Amino acid sequence: MTDKVKQQCRARIGMVNFINTAPLYEVWRQTVNRPQWRITEAAPTTLNKMLYENMLDLGFVSSQEYAAHPHLYRMLADLSISATGPVGSVFLFSRFKPQELDHRLVLLSSQSQTSVALVKIILEEFYQVFPRYAVNNENRKLNKAAAVLAIGDDALRLVGKNSFPVQLDLSEVWQQHTGLPFVFAVWAVRDNFWRQDKSCVGQIRRELLRCVNDGGKNLRAVCETVAPRIPMTTAACYDYLRSIEYDLSPDKKQALETFYSFLIKRGEAPEEALPIKLIS
């Protein structure tokens, strides 16, 4: 690829810098030298808003964001943040069994639209309970809450603490009820950006796939770098990241379609969310 072709490929890219993206993002930061690819680091909800408002061209966003505005986006094939069974970093921490949460206060994370939608589906559709919801704003209502949704690094810090005796791994509960993995985040591309420069999108996708592959091969080294953030041991980080999956296999696509079907049924996404538009 010529330098001229590389220079012509300009993009605004959104990245999540949680521990669960480290096998991709740490390799990206160390090996991708493309100044014309401008990176924004933020929580998923912030990247969702930026992508929707055309402040980004593509990004690692909540899978719910694609479903909410399917006319704006396409999805990169073969890339996700997902889990088959327990994910280890998306929990409903509760003082009660889920069946006992009807009308009780449940605090929701402000960092991920997907996890908020998922916990509501699990409680309302699977357990048939209807709590009162509020956003967890700087832990001000934590002592009054029956349960709290925590994701990413925040969830890793709460695991094992005695404040909440019931700890529901939402990906595990989803699999128990659907038999499917769960896809938390996808690479969404603005449709107009893809149409104007398909070659550029292809370049970025190839680099992302390379980073995922290299990160998986060097997972212990990645953990040595990022584990102190939590803090957690390198061994605990390694065990955790082995449960995170970064592909978008046929069963993951089916899982997304099932999740989107729930959102459509609940009036939280338009029918146009299906079928999913993939970029290969």
Image (spheres, helix red, strand yellow):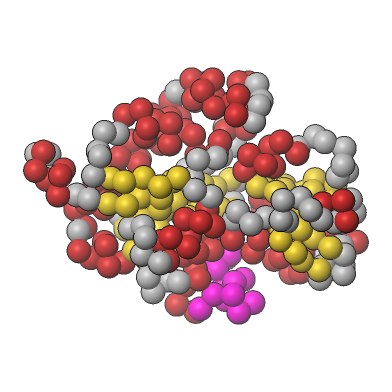
Report the magenta stretch's main SS.
helix
Is 113 on the left-hand or right-hand side of 124? Answer: left
The residue that appears at 40% across and 67% down in the rendered structure is 53
- Residue 10's spot in the image, x, y percent? 22, 50
Q: Is residue 252 visible?
A: no
Q: Give 132 or 74, whichever is nearer the viewer.
A: 132
The residue that appears at 55% across and 68% down in the rendered structure is 260
- Residue 48's spot in the image, x, y percent? 48, 60
- Residue 280's spot in the image, x, y percent? 30, 54
Boundaries of the magenta span: 255-270
- What is the total number of numbered labels drawn onto the structure image? 0
Q: Give 258 or 133, whichever is nearer the viewer.
A: 133
Q: Is residue 265 magenta?
A: yes
Location of residue 120 (image quadrant)? bottom right
Rendered view: 269 above or below 76: below
Rendered view: 204 above or below 264: above
Q: Is residue 14 visible?
A: yes
The residue that appears at 26% across and 61% down in the rendered structure is 194
Is 5 on the left-hand or right-hand side of 40? Answer: left
Q: Is residue 147 magenta?
A: no
Point out the image quarter for the N terminus.
top left
The residue that appears at 67% across and 55% down in the rendered structure is 109
- Residue 208's spot in the image, x, y percent? 35, 41
Is 179 on the left-hand or right-hand side of 190? Answer: right
